[in-house]
Amino acid sequence: MIRVQEEDFDVGAELAALTEGRHEIGGLAVFIGLVRATVGNDGAPADVEAMTLEHYPGMTEKKLREIEQEALSRWPLSASLIVHRYGRLVPGDRIVMTACASAHRHAAFEACSFLMDWLKTKAPFWKVEEQDGEARWVEARASDSAAERRWLPSDDS
Amino acid sequence: MIRVQEEDFDVGAELAALTEGRHEIGGLAVFIGLVRATVGNDGAPADVEAMTLEHYPGMTEKKLREIEQEALSRWPLSASLIVHRYGRLVPGDRIVMTACASAHRHAAFEACSFLMDWLKTKAPFWKVEEQDGEARWVEARASDSAAERRWLPSDDS
Amino acid sequence: MKLLYFAWVKTRIGLAEEEVTPPAEVATVGQLMTWLAGRGPGYAEAFAEPERLRAAVNQDFAKPDATIDAGDEVAFFPPVTGG
Amino acid sequence: MKLLYFAWVKTRIGLAEEEVTPPAEVATVGQLMTWLAGRGPGYAEAFAEPERLRAAVNQDFAKPDATIDAGDEVAFFPPVTGG
């Protein structure tokens, strides 16, 4: 299941709904992305006051569905979830959660990590950070492209 | 932080407490282990009515602290948590949760996976399953020993 | 043809979306970028470094050599930063 | 010496813990297992296949050749299944 929304989500409630009555599920790997107070991606100790996520309505949902389908085709998952927010967020706010349920924990971990790697490079979101009244677009990271390529077949990289 | 307890835990509340006011945290990897309704570790489609976890009070806390310290020494984590239950549980119940917070998602994922792998082979818990009025001790899995060895230095395996 | 702009492409051009009818010889995403760059100073600035831009045609990522049709929805934006 | 038994070791012996004073020549975990196996049918059954058992001395995992002292806490159990 995928959702794109401006409002916050309740992690406990999302996970309870995902696993409700599904007694074949032995493990649930989850990732939650939070707004950091440090500028950009280099972790410099400067204060970010807020971050606004812009996205491409329609394409976002399409890409999230494709990413989820790819995970479901690669790992034996009982359930999966991607919730991604947009709009203005402040440090500590939740941005995204991914969850993968499986009978086997390594499958759940790998699939959840895969979802995050692909979201970084394939989901049409853009982030603008506010600091000292200045707005700055966050640039894509080379390390995220490298992380995406971890999941390609070796003859394709 | 580690906790061993008979009562259930609230995943959302645990995560909120772990990250409260910690604005350097960019990502939180979490694993939640649930009681499966399938017997043993082979996933046979027979019904387990309940599972009771026995543990070694004192040694359990000591081992969980050692496992957490090992993760903190290997990855740049801002926070970590292990909560492990004991006592009688039914299918769908939460058994364990591990959480690792880091500025970087791959560190959080790896550390969280590591915690689970080491818990499986280094935390003194034993599981007995009830099925059709019979109680059966769950045997340790060779695959868990293999998973533990993933994290050893190569000259040590 | 419906065009959408995101992030700093949108702020440079000063528009989130518009309808355009490029000439018939504009047949690919790359040719569309060149044509758009000539529409004014904001466009020129937005498309000054094409290698810094990404595109989508009908909500799928598309390379500069991807072909475009009159009824397509084409979007331009910087590399995405999801998650 | 305080002994603790867990899982099916406990159910076979019929005790969760006990205090014992083994003879002086019982100096290792392995020797303690052999000595315990002679204490009765439940013990004999519990220690019949030593390779299926694990031990801890003072709450750390210990191999059969680990030495033991009178004041130690020694535990016997099957391989653990945490998580």
Image (cartoon, coloured by chain):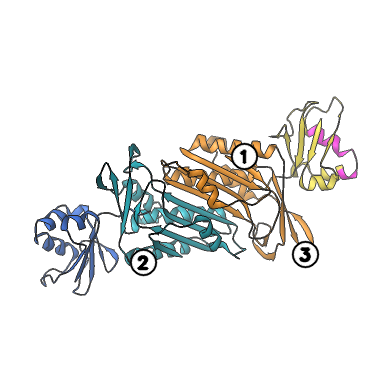
Chain colours: A cyan, B orange, C blue, D yellow
- State the residue at coordinates (63%, 47%): B84
Q: Which residue is mark 1?
A: B64
Mark 2 falls within which chain?
Answer: A
Q: Residue A20: x, y in percent?
A: 58, 64
- Name the amino acid, label 3: Asp
The region drawn magenta spans: D30-42
Q: Residue A35: x, y in percent?
A: 38, 47
Q: Which residue is mark 3?
A: B132
Q: Which residue is mark 2?
A: A62
Label annotation for residue A50: none
- SS at circle 2: helix
Q: Choose between B53 and B42: the one closer to the eye.
A: B53
* Membership of D41 in magenta stretch: yes
Q: Residue A70: x, y in percent?
A: 43, 63
Q: Quadrant of residue C40?
A: bottom left
- Name the amino acid, label 2: Lys
Numbered disc total: 3
Residue at the right extreme, as displayed: D40
- State the residue at coordinates (59%, 46%): B146
